[in-house]
Amino acid sequence: MAEQSKLSLGGKDYDYPIIKGSVGPDVIDIRKLYGQTGAFTFDPGFTSTAACESALTYIDGDEGVLLHRGYPIGQLAEQSSFMEVSYLLLNGELPSGRELEEFSRTISRHTMLHEQLMSFYSGFRRDAHPMAIMCGVVGALSAFYHDSTDIADPKHRKISSHRLIAKMPTIAAAAYKYSVGQPFMYPDNRLSYTGNFLRMTFGVPAEDYEVIPEIERAMDRIFILHADHEQNASTSTVRLAGSSGANPFACIAAGIACLWGPAHGGANEAALNMLREIGTPDRIPHYIERAKDKNDPFRLMGFGHRVYKNYDPRATVMQKTVREVFDAMKVSDPVFETALRLEEIALHDPYFVEKKLFPNVDFYSGIILSAIGFPTTMFTVLFALARTVGWVAQWNEMISDPNQKIGRPRQLYTGPTERDYVPIGKR
Ligand code: ACO
């Protein structure tokens, strides 16, 4: 019999089984709690609640560990490719050479968009935020690919997953092209997933585009670092949307909307804007004081994390990648020196030490993306592009789970109790 935990409520004792994962904290199975006691649990930010079972990604926030299907993120970022990590997340195991080739070929066959979909872009203002365009265009995919929206059919699920991963770079690059008034670039499937994206973003039809291998590698690594991150806000949004049986294109659009927020995917944009605002290292102490002031809403963007109470392992790889990109592009950016100094000062400041606030993945990513040539408004779009594989893998895992139910949280009601309606003339 499973180990039990005891709860005393209203003078009665109840037993709830403890379930063990392969690694990480145990969970107390409270599914029968309400039926047996009439009480709910209260955990608004899900700080102590496991909302599902998952075999995809494991994070130990205290130790700064991130594993995908058991493989450490550092090893994947150094030795693997985004296509391989995508295969791993979707299928559970690393592919053989032949499997990877076949998977990459399948993805590249789906890179084009329905031509009619391209006319959506001209409906947006030129100065629209590209994340607004992403929400709209990705949501619209379900109006174009009816032949892969039957979520009960595993073949449909597979095709829609491949379509989402394959089309996201084309959609993202077109959002950028629209904002700068350049013609859309069609995909060139002779290139890698990431090379193709760089060409669609920075190439123009009038000239040949040469992919710089070091930049392609850095971009691919950034995609790996963002591929999945367990049950974060946008992934939970995708799962919740999917739990009602909504089609995958609609679910991923919901995930994109959630990711846009500055506390989540929008933080990379906010982090670079903050570093540019700070400008020079001598101004850092002023901003550190502001971050610590409870009466000032300012926070150090790119610092702190709900799960990591240690250095985010993705930030380590990111910091290293900054130097590689600068070397490849023969550029530098004084903002990097400001970032390094800010990190050093914060990591020695009792406020940040006590609250265990460390740089997260977003702290350095903006510096790299800016050096590659992306405007800040595209940063969260790149995050969405990469995270699509995690969302899709998590969505597939949820749909295949026999215990899957519609997500329906309860609440602690604090509003008025029942009262009679008063006609408007008598109020
Ligand atoms: N700067 C200053 N103080 C901070 C910061 C920060 N970046 N982050 C947290 N704190 C403080 C809070 O004021 C709070 O202090 P208190 O206990 O005295 O009230 C304490 O640390 C805990 O913070 P919470 O907001 O309660 O922690 P939570 O886990 O809810 O928030 C979050 C995590 C949202 C990431 C937060 O650290 C933050 O806002 N960081 C800046 C935004 C950011 O970088 N987001 C990217 C996250 S990574 C990602 O999405 C890919």
Image (spheres, rainbow, N blue to C red):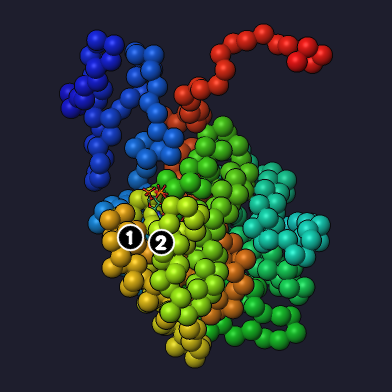
Q: Could you say which is closer to the camera, residue 179 or residue 364?
A: 364
Reading the image, the residue beneath label 2 is 303
Q: Report x, y in % for residue 329.
A: 51, 87
Distance from mark 2 CB to nearest ligand 1 atom below 8 Å: yes
Distance from mark 1 CB to nearest ligand 1 atom below 8 Å: yes
Spatial separation of the CA atoms under disc 1 and disc 2: 9 Å
Q: Secondary structure at mark 2?
A: loop
C-beta proximity under 8 Å, tags 1 and 2 = yes
Q: Report x, y in % for residue 199.
A: 62, 77
Q: Is residue 397 above or below residue 330?
A: above
What residue type is disc 1 on?
A: Phe
Question: Residue at coordinates 43% horizontally, 39% vertically from top-left?
Answer: 45
For residue 314, which numbered disc appears in the image? none
Q: Quadrant of residue 370?
A: bottom right
Q: Which is more N-terminal, label 2 or label 1?
A: 2
What crowding class fits label 2: few (fewer than 14 Cα within 10 Å), some (14-19), or many (20 or more)?
many
Q: In the rendered image, is residue 259 in sight?
A: yes
Residue 35 lies left or right of residue 416; in this view the side is: left
Reading the image, the residue beneath label 1 is 352
Q: Secondary structure at mark 1?
A: helix
Q: In the rendered image, is residue 314 in sight?
A: no
What residue type is disc 2 on?
A: Phe
Q: How many marks?
A: 2
| Quadrant housing the N terminus | top left
Q: Could you say which is closer to the camera, residue 66 or residue 371?
A: 371
Question: Residue at coordinates 68% horizontally, 68% vertically from top-left?
Answer: 176
Q: Quadrant of residue 47?
A: top left
Residue 298 lies left or right of residue 136; in this view the side is: left
Residue 138 lies left or right of residue 335; in this view the side is: right
Q: Is residue 263 above or below residue 327?
A: above
Q: Report x, y in % for residue 250.
A: 63, 44
Q: Report x, y in % for residue 78.
A: 35, 72
